[in-house]
Amino acid sequence: MSALRLDPVSVPEPVSGPAGDSGPAGGPDPAGVLDPAGGPGPADEPGSDGSRCGDGASRGIAGLPFRFQVVAALALAVIGVIACVQIGMVFLHVAPSNTVSKQYGKAVDDWIYPEFEQNWKLFAPNPLQQNIDVQARAEIKLPNGTTRTTDWIDLSAQDGDAIRHNPLPSHTEQNELRRGWDFFVGSHTDDNKPNGQRGELSEQYLRRIVMLRLGTHRDGGSVDRIQVRSMTTSVKGPSWSDEKTDTRPSYREVPWWTVTPADLPQGAGDARTEAKR
C-alpha cells in the first residue's frame, strides 16, 4: 500500500507597505474597517474645512460656511423686521382712533390696503370715552300734606364711593345701576317712549332699583314720586393730544313716575342711601 502524500500549501507572505499608509509594516489597519477598494470609508473622508462629512447636516446653520451663516442671519433679521412692522400696522388699523393712528394714518392705509384690509376692530364697540352718572330725585309727601322735592342724588357716585378702595366690591355695586340704565335706554326711544316689548319691563326694573336706593321714607315724609336722569360727560383727551373735547355735561331726563307698591322691593326702607341720610 502506497502512503498518502500531502503537499504543503504555500501561504503568501504579507506585503510590507510604508508606515504612513496603514500603520506599521505588516500591521492591521488602525480603523479596522476598509471599503472594498481598500481605502477609508466615506464617513471617514475629511471635508474641505477639515471636518467629517455629514456633520453639517446635523448642525443646522452652524454647520454652514461663515459667509452662508452671515447671509442666513441677515435674511432672518429682515423677516423679523417685516413681521414686526406688519403686526404694528395691523394693530393700528384695527385699534380705535388714537394719536398715533391719526398722525400716521396715511402710512398705515398705504401699507394695509388692499392686500391686508381687515373688516373687524380691536374693540367693539369703541372703548367708553364718556362718564355716565345716573341721578335721581324724589318728591316727598310730608305729614302736614305738603310736598317738597329733593335735590338730585348721584346714585352712580354712591356706588363709586362703595367700590373705591374695596378689594372685593360686590357685583351689585359695580353693575346693577349701570346695566339697569343701559337696559332702559336700549329699550326706549330718545323721547323715552318704549320701542318694544321690553320697554315696560325695563322701566319697572329701573324704578325698583331707584326705590331700593332712595328708600320709601325720606326727610320726614314718604316718597310719592321719583324722577331719573343721566348726566353724560366726555372724557378730556390727554395732555399730548390736540383733540378738542367738549367736557360740558349733557342730560337726559325721564318723566316723573308715581311710586306704586310694585316699585317697592322688599327691604327698600333699609336702603343704603336711607341709612346714610
Image: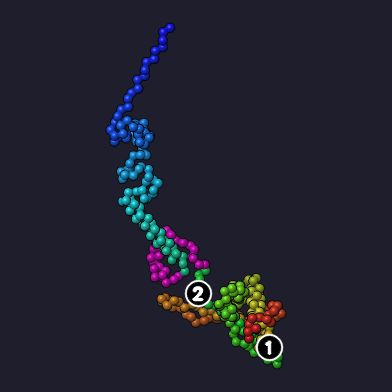
- Whole-Å distance between the Cαs marked 1 and 2? 39 Å
Q: Residue at x 64, y 90 (%)?
A: 148
Q: Nearer the viewer, residue 63 or 264?
A: 63
Q: Nearer the viewer, residue 38 or 149?
A: 38
Question: Percent from the top left, x then y, of residue 81?
Answer: 38, 60
Q: Nearer the viewer, residue 15 or 163?
A: 15
Relative to residue 160, is residue 151 depicted above or below? below
Residue at which label 1 appears: 221
Give the magenta-colored segment's residue range: 97-124
Mark yes or no: residue 114 visible.
no
Callout 1–callout 2 Cβ contact below 8 Å: no
Helix or strand or loop: what does disc 2 sit on? loop
Asked whether residue 112 is drawn in magenta, I would say yes
Q: Which mark is residue 129?
A: 2
The mark nearer the N terminus, 1 or 2, is 2
Question: Percent from the top left, x then y, of residue 29?
Answer: 35, 34
Helix or strand or loop: what does disc 1 sit on? strand
Relative to residue 224, is residue 120 depicted above or below? above
